[in-house]
Image (cartoon, helix red, strand yellow):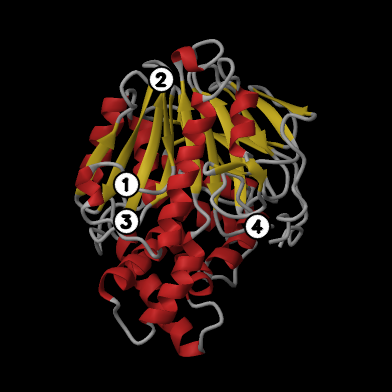
Amino acid sequence: MNGSTPRRPLFVARLRGTQAEMGAQHGRLVADDAVRLYEFYKTMPERTLAGDMPRPAKLAVRAIANAWQARLARERPPELAARTRAFVDAVREVMPRHDAKGAALTLATMDSMQNCVSVVARAQLGPFSRPLMARAVAAAVPACSTLIAWGRTTEDGELLFGRNFDFPGVGVWDAAPAFVVCVPDQGQRYGFFTTRGADTPVVTVVNEAGLILAPHTRWHRGITWGGAMIVDLVHDIARRAETLADAIAIAKEKRASSSWGIAIGSAREKSGCVVELAGPHADVVRPRPGSEYIACTNRYRTETLQAGELSGSAAWAIHSDRREARLRQLVDTRERALTARDIAGFLGDRRDVNAPERVRHLGAILAQPLNVHCVVAKPGAGEAWLGVDAAPSCEGKWAHIAWAWDGPQGGWEANAPGFTTTPLAGFVAPHDQATRHV
C-alpha cells in the first residue's frame, strides 16, 4: 500500500574508482535505505509465491529460493561480487544485527523467484505445486513495458527510451527514486535509475556510448541452476558495450540463469532491439521492416525462445500481448512525431487495445498499479524525464534530470555539479485514485 515509507526527494549520486570502491561509496551514502530495502526484499519470494499458504510451504519456498540465490552468487564476476561485499560492509555500520551474506543474496531475488515459478510450471513439482502455481499466476500479472523510438518516429530524430517497471514493492521502491552515475577506473561510464539503498545497475541503465537497456520478465523451460544473475549481465553490458552488436555478444557470452527479454536502444546507431534469453538459449528481436521503433513487454517473439515458453495462465499471455499491441497502436496512430511527453503519456495509458473507448483501472493496460518506476530517457543528450511520485509512478509528479559524466563524487538531494533536476508541472495525468492503493 502506498505510504508505507515516508516519501523522499529525488536522490542523485556520482561514484568513482574500482567497483569495490564505488560499492563502498554508495553504501555509505544510502545505508539507512539499504536496511529498509533488505528487510522488505529478503522475504519477497516466499511472500509472493507462498502468500497465505501454511508455514511449511513458506519455508519450502524460502529454502529453494535461498539455495538458488547462493548458487548464482558463486558464479558472479569477482569485481562485481567485490562491489556488493563493499556495499554491504559499508551499510553494516547501521545494520550490525543483520546477515551480510543474506543482504548480498537479495541481488538474485528476481532470478531465483522466476526460476522457481518456471520449475513448478514446467514440471508441477512438489507437494505445493498447485497452490504455488496459483500464487505465481497472481504474482506474474504485473510486468513491464518499454517503447524505443527514433528517426521519423520522434520529433528531432533522436532516440527516446520509455520504460515502465512494474514490480512488487509499492510504498518501498517508489518511495525514494534515485539516479546514480558510476565512473569506473575501467570501461564505460554509466548511470542507473534505482531506489535509494539499492546498488542495482539493472532496472534502467544508460552508458556514455548512448546505450540504454532494461530487462523484462519472461517464463521459460530453459532456465538453469547456474549462470549469470540479471543484475550482473546488465551491469556488464553497461560497462563494456558501445554498440548493439556488443550488447548482444555480451548477453550471449554470459548465459543468463533465468528468462529475460532485454530491451536495448542505441542513440548513436538510432536503433533498438530486444535480446531474448533463457539459460543457454538466446535470440534477438529486431524492429519490424520499415519501423523506426520497437516495443517490448513480457512474451518471447523469436521462434527460438517461443519453443520453450511457459505461461502461468491464459491471462498472462493476454495481459502481455495486449500491452505490447497497445503501445504499437499508440505509435501507429500518432498525429505527429513523438516527444518525451508523448511517450510518458503512453506509459500511463489506461485503455485496452481491443476496447480503446473505455478508460480502465485494471487489466491489460500500460498503467499498472504496481508501477514503481517510470522513465523516458534521451541517452544521446544525457537527460531523462522521471516519475517521482507514489505508485503508479507513470502518473502524478515528474521531474526532468540532466547529467554530466564528469563531476565530483558524492550524493545530493538537489542540483549538484553535473546534475540538474527540475520539477515538471502537469507533465502526465494525475493519479488514478482507484488504483493508488491496490
List the single residue furthest toward the right.
425
x, y percentage for residue 43? 53, 71
- Looking at this view, is 121 or 320 the one in front? 320
Amino acid carrying label 2: it is: Glu
Q: Which residue is mark 3?
A: 258
Q: Residues within 10 Å of mark 2 (few under 14, many from 20)?
A: some
Amino acid carrying label 3: it is: Ser
Location of the N terminus by quadrant is bottom right
Q: Label 1 to label 3, Cα distance in Å?
A: 14 Å
Which disc, if any, is residue 170?
A: 4
Q: Residues within 10 Å of mark 4 (few under 14, many from 20)?
A: many
Q: Which residue is mark 1?
A: 300
Which disc, if any, is residue 292?
A: 2
**Which of the two discs, 3 and 2, sits closer to the camera?**
2
Q: Label 1 to label 2, Cα distance in Å?
A: 20 Å
Q: Label 4 to label 2, Cα distance in Å?
A: 34 Å
Residue occupying the point 73% across, 44% down: 389
